[in-house]
Image (tube, rainbow, N blue to C red):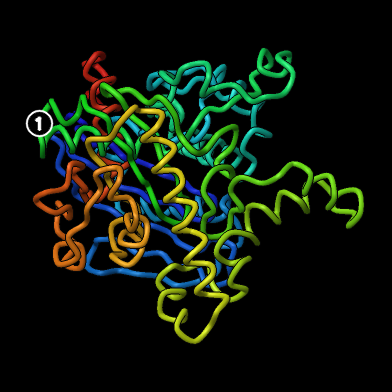
Amino acid sequence: MNNKTGILTINAGSSSIKFSVYDVNPSLNKTLYGQIQNIGSGNARFTSSMSDQHYQGEFQDMDKAGQWLIEWLEKQNIFSRIAAIGHRIVHGLKHTAPEIITTTLLEELNSISAYDPEHLPGEIRLVESLAQHNPDLLQVACFDTSFHSSMPIVAQFLTIPRSFHDKGIRRYGFHGLSYTYLMEELGSQAGDEAMKGKVILAHLGSGASMAAVKEGKSIDTSMGFTPASGLTMSTRAGDLDPGVAWYLMAIEKFSPEAFNDLINHKSGLLGISETSSDMHDLLLARAKDHRAAEAVDIFCYLAKKYVGSYAAALNGLDTLIFSGGIGENSPEVRSAICEGLEFLGIEIDEVKNRANEQVISTDNSRVAIRVIKTNEELIIARLVGKLVNSKPDRWKS
């Protein structure tokens, strides 16, 4: 039988599924990619790299979208050359490295689904659906939280009674696969010295977070117990006074489910602007709509505060990296975040910034400001490849 040399990567979000196929012969080479977007919105869309093929239709929920994707991949005969599937798993608790998915691991993940109801249940069911389709196919969990396992205790603790920390209620951090890629790419572009310096990573997209990294290790990050905390995002509230939760539940009679829906799907840029969760739309509308302008201003203001606080945590700053859909594509947002931070050594070159160059800081800036396009799928493929290489027989069909 022919050798199987393919890795399928699955990156399931709260309303999207991205996938890629990498050939591992002789090195990682992406041969297929695609995504299902806006799942559950009534305007979901599937696109792939195969002959610009696309399908627009109704994927009512993640389960139906996942099943449709499995059937589509089967029709393309993809599974016949796949040795392993790598999954981005948002929450990993104590897990600090990729792991082969077993029944025991799935049971553990199911037990903590309440930690992240927006991501974990859908990710688990997709793993289970793939296992039902091909029970002999190796599946690997790559945990978004593992990058932040190096955070010191002062960055992990939530200031509620210690007994809750002992039960696992603490700050974990997310976007770890993205941050892993950004740090590796920083080393590739600027060398080991830059990678070991004092770095702030800004993953700014529909989900947004920042991380402070020193000597290659995360020392703090904006997302905490769940991905809903930290910076305000497209539809997520970010940090919120806990008294607001009490008020909404006690006075407005919100149920826990309604509150969760509010802070994850109706807040952030959408809640402030009352029109759109898309930064591009808000930038276009801000000249004529004060609500859109305020949404942009609040986003940038909060991001700027995190840059300042993380520079303090790092005791200085060598590199600031922008990534994610907003960070990679919005010069206006990058400029607004950097404005007024000259006292930290941050000086942005607006010509380079507007051109979306790789380095957008001035020649005199003490801090290197970089724009790096993230690639979570490639990191998943690398991690899975390393794990499978430790089990060479897995490459055989």
Q: Quadrant of residue 23?
A: top left
Q: Residue at x 24, y 16 (%)?
A: 393
Q: Residue at x 74, y 18 (%)?
A: 161
Q: Nearer the viewer, residue 54 or 1?
A: 54
Q: Compared to 363, does 181 lie above or below?
A: above
The answer to whether one can see residue 2 in this image is: no
Is residue 195 found left or right of 155 in the rendered image?
Answer: left
Count of numbered circles on the image: 1
Q: Looking at the picture, how far across and down is residue 363, in whole percent?
A: 9, 51
For the N terminus, the quadrant is top left
Q: Looking at the picture, how far across and down is residue 109, in whole percent?
A: 59, 26
Question: Which residue is at the far front?
Answer: 343
Is residue 9 found left or right of 285 in the rendered image?
Answer: left
Is residue 286 found left or right of 380 in the rendered image?
Answer: right
The answer to whether one can see residue 256 in this image is: yes
Q: Looking at the picture, how far across and down is residue 281, in whole percent?
A: 44, 75
Q: Nearer the viewer, residue 74 or 55?
A: 55
Residue beneath label 1, please? Answer: 191
Q: Residue at x 18, y 38 (%)?
A: 185
Q: Residue at x 13, y 26 (%)?
A: 193
- Packing grade of label 1 (10 A; few <14, some 14-19, many >=20) is few
Q: Indicate the secondary structure of the residue bearing disc 1.
A: loop
For the C terminus, the quadrant is top left
Q: Compared to 230, does 361 lie above or below?
A: below
Q: Compared to 275, does 28 lie above or below?
A: above
Is residue 128 found left or right of 149 in the rendered image?
Answer: right
Q: Quadrant of residue 136?
A: top left
The amino acid beneath tag 1 is: Gly
